[in-house]
Image: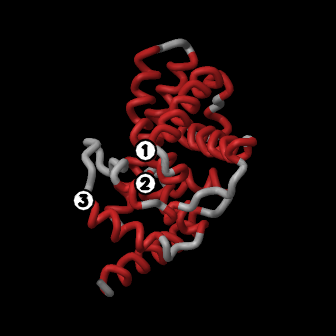
Amino acid sequence: MFVLYMEKLLENYRRLKLDRLAKKMQKGDAKAAEEIYNYFANKLFGFLFNRVRNKATAEDLAQDIFLKLVSKISLFDPKLGSFSTWFWQLARNTLIDHYRSSENNKRVNNFSEFKEEAIEEISTDESGRLESKFELNKVFEFLKTLDPEEQEFFELRFISQLSFREISQITDKSEGSLRVYAMRLKRKIKDDLKDK
């Protein structure tokens, strides 16, 4: 019970801090913009790379998203939702636009469809170090067992580290159903690890 309370408290603190930074950024505060960039950069790159499986494309998309953030920051209204949710919706829409463009009008890539070479490009931890190829292969093999909806939830929750509230606002699913979804996914992971 205490852990859940602390998680909620930290989530609210993070949400309020990002909302304050966004308001400062709307007033032209470059330091606030830098803090927002530093907060989201690694999470955003991980999310994008997991979708496009190409380091250069992920970097280009991330740059586009941050440029859109600068040009559209005036549209953020804290009365309509948190900045974090607004930012991730902007990122998700940019990714959708990427796939809708004529040259990218292929099916959306699933997280589990990584090619062997792509594993070498992945940086999975906070310091940017590459995890061992063996461990990543195990993760990718497991992710192949997930359906596309589970893969997207995995990316939003565990790669981008969004709260249930933020994922709920992005996907239009209730927080309660997302919590149940997370428990089922964790059980799947645990069962998969037990089998190996």
Task: Report the Cα–Cα distance between label 2 and label 3.
Answer: 17 Å
Q: Earlier in the sequence, mark 3 or mark 1?
A: 1
| Local crowd size for mark 2, using a 10 Å CA cut-off: few (<14), some (14–19), many (≥20) | some
Estimate the spatial distance between the alpha carbons at disc 2 and disc 1, rounded to whole Å: 7 Å
Can you give x and y, in whole percent of width and height, for residue 113 in the image? Answer: 51, 64
For the residue labelled by badge 1, is the local secondary structure a helix, a strand or a loop?
A: helix
The residue located at (27%, 66%) in the rendering is 134
Mark closer to the observer (2, 3): 3
Quarter placement of the C terminus: bottom left
Which residue is disc 2 drawn over? Answer: 159
Looking at the rendered structure, the kind of residue marked 2 is Ile
Residue corresponding to mark 3: 132
Instruction: Give the mark nearer the N terminus: 2 vs 1.
Output: 1
Residue 21 horizontal/vertical position (percent): 47, 26
List x then y, in percent, for residue 91: 59, 40
For the residue pair 82 and 54, the one nearer the viewer reads as 54
Circles 2 and 3, Cβ within 8 Å, touching? The answer is no
Q: Position of residue 192 (x, y in %)?
A: 37, 81
Packing grade of label 3 (10 A; few <14, some 14-19, many >=20) is: few
Residue 140's place in the image compared with 89, above or below, is below
Q: Amino acid at mark 1?
A: Lys
Label whose residue precedes the other's in the sequence (2 or 3): 3
Residue 83: image tag: none
**Residue 88 vs residue 142, the one in the foreground:** 142
Q: Disc 1 designates what residue?
A: 43
Q: Amino acid at mark 3?
A: Ser
